[in-house]
Amino acid sequence: MNDGIFIYRIYEDFLYPNAANYMEKLVEEVFRKTKSGKSFLYKNLGEQPWNLQTSRHPQRQHQLLDPRPHLHAIILDFTGISHVDITSLQHLVDIRQQLDNYTNSKVNWHFVGIANPWIKRALLAHGFGSSNDINQTFAMANANSILVPILDTSYPLFHVDVDEAYQTALVDLAKRQNIDSSALTVS
């Protein structure tokens, strides 16, 4: 995907031994395929703060004609996950803060296929699952029918499948960029 939306599937339980590995690979891929949202440029790596993890080539990262998109959203596919622990959740919080700093804006984190309600509860307790930027509007198709949502609509960043999460991220991206969302199509 070349629109700043990353889809990342985790195939096994998201626990302490493998959380750092998963998140390290995710951050490396994000840094390689997106550009930073910050406008300042360090002339060499020695000027960069030691705890600021960015590209190893800052001059390439900040070129004006850099075709890479800004990071907008991360979609984590949790269909293969039945357990999480506190350390893996703290990794998610730390990576969210790191990527928000990298993009100089808030990155939306979408979660797909959470089967265990305790995982959803833990993510909510750590600040995931809702966004102030996303406002869902519903149209009435027939005023005589009663529509009942099958998912909780108060947490718009939890999804049933990857397609729904991707479409939601595209609509939010269009709102952020003031583009007509009807022009965006998925093929």
Image (spheres, rainbow, N blue to C red):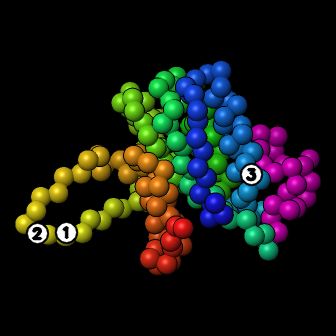
Quadrant containing the C terminus is bottom right
Which residue type carries mark 3? Answer: Phe
Could you tell me which residue is drawn at 70 percent across and 31 percent down?
21
Element assignment for label 1: loop
Q: Position of residue 152 (x, y in %)?
A: 29, 46
In this rendering, the answer to whether 126 lies above or below 165 is: above
Q: Which residue is mark 2?
A: 143
N-terminal-most mark, 3 or 2: 3
Marks 2/1 in contact by CB < 8 Å: the verdict is yes
Q: Counting other residues with Cα less than 10 Å from the Cα at mark 2, is it few (<14), some (14-19), or many (20 or more)? A: few
Reading the image, the residue beneath label 1 is: 140
Q: Nearer the viewer, mark 1 or mark 3?
A: 1
Q: Which residues are magenta?
A: 43-64
51 or 140, which lies in front?
140
> Who's the residue at 10% across and 69% down the image?
143
Provide residue 58's location: percent of width, then percent of height: 85, 57
